[in-house]
Image: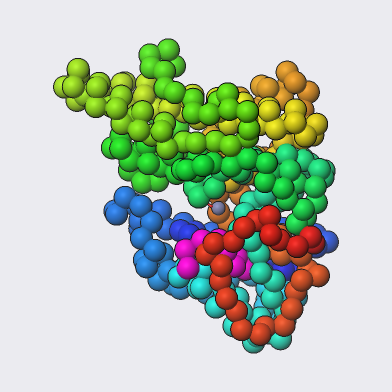
Amino acid sequence: MRVLGYESSCDETGVALYDTEKGLLAHCLHTQMAMHAEYGGVVPELASRDHIRRVVPLTDACLKEAGLTLADVDAVAYTQGPGLGGALLVGAGFANALAFALGKPVIEVHHLEGHLLSPLLADERPEFPFLALLVSGGHSQIMAVRGVGDYEVLGETLDDAAGEAFDKTAKLMGLDYPGGPRLSKLAEEGDASRFTLPRPMLHSDNLDMSFSGLKTAVLTLVRDVEAQEGGLKEQTRKDICRAFQDAIVDVLLAKCLKALKQTGFKQLVVAGGVGANRQLREALNGAAARRKFKVFYPPLALCTDNGAMIAFAGALRLKYAHPVAGYTVKPRWDLASLPKA
Ligand code: KG4
Ligand code: ZN
């Protein structure tokens, strides 16, 4: 069975074709980052309009890359939520119209389930059950994953998501959108011994996290340093980025280790955009080697939003494929409410 998948929940339009026997056949992506950079963040209305512009050419490119045509598609999957309402409607509207025209069924996919299962697209794959650290721009959760659709949230952020903390901190330090990857690049050249920032909830007796206080601590530090140095020197900026990244990585690592101990699981899956962070990967890989557990990541290109994870999650949920009969989107959608596949 071949599933054509659509992702349009935020600022990336993704289209991919997944074959249940041959694996991922093709995936095409357009990122709107350059368009939103001018405004310092995602502008929802512009995002929706750009998805409309991209969805047809990306579909053509994806089918061309796979060497197939629409006649070879057996089902159409799309991100139903969570995400930006207008952006989701573009993918949902297009996927339903296409499936209706082809006389094929549709499958609604939860965006976070796509992220969560994306490490199963890598060469080295985890087996159920595993622990998942889901760290994206909108979510930070630690989950027990016992099967497709069998998700238990063990801990989550009480305020900002990890990616959101990266982006907001980057913005207040004067870095362009998207700040997360830029901040992490500067941090690599920072001096880890110069500043120390708080590690919120590091020693709390649960698996919850909180990152908004860290952002405020950076703001205070930047103001102090600016007053002393008469501005923010380039090296100082790098040193602050490093202190911020050290704090986030420490908290995420500590919470993962605690969750592994609590569940007894020996496998950790890291998904979502922040999973691309090099320092986080080094910290988790180092701990895994010392403590004898395994860490799995999606292929690097599939860490941030993409259509491949949606086509794949759709393929794992084929039993829920159904004929087109109207559609809705779910800008807010609890992952733990999904039925088992
Ligand atoms: O999963 P994703 O593409 O979109 C959401 O579903 O939110 O994640 C995007 C988030 C952004 O906040 C971005 O700044 C962050 O992932 N991100 C990173 C890195 N690459 C992307 N954060 C830290 N270090 C990175 N290398
Ligand atoms: Zn995402």
**In the foreground, 135 or 126:** 135
Asked if residue 282 is positioned above or below residue 141 in the image, the reply reads: above
Q: Residue 158: in sight, yes or no?
A: yes
The residue at the far front in this view is 205
Residue 107, position as x, y percentages in the image? 69, 71
Q: Which region is colored magenta? A: 78-85
277 or 228, nearer to the observer: 228
The number of callouts visible is 0
Quarter of the rendering occupied by the C terminus: bottom right
Q: Residue at x 24, y 27 (%)?
A: 223
Is residue 138 found left or right of 315 in the rendered image? left
Image spot of residue 208 (x, y percent):
58, 37
Inspect this view and state whether residue 253 appears: no
User: Could you say which quadrant of the image residue 109 lies in?
Assistant: bottom right
Q: The N terminus is located in which quarter?
A: bottom right
Residue 190 at x, y percent in the picture = 40, 21
* Residue drawn at point x = 52 percent, y = 64 percent: 331
Q: Residue at x 38, y 56 (%)?
A: 42
| Residue 16 lies in the magenta-colored region | no
- Return the x and y of residue 154 as percentages of the image width and height: 67, 41
Residue under the point 71% across and 86% down? 103
Residue farthest toward the left in the current orientation of the protein: 230
User: In the image, is residue 330 above or below residue 153?
Assistant: below
Magenta stretch: includes residue 82: yes
Q: Quadrant of residue 295?
A: top right
Query: 22 or 9, which is in the foreground?
Result: 9
Query: How was the colour assigned to the protein in this rendering?
Result: rainbow
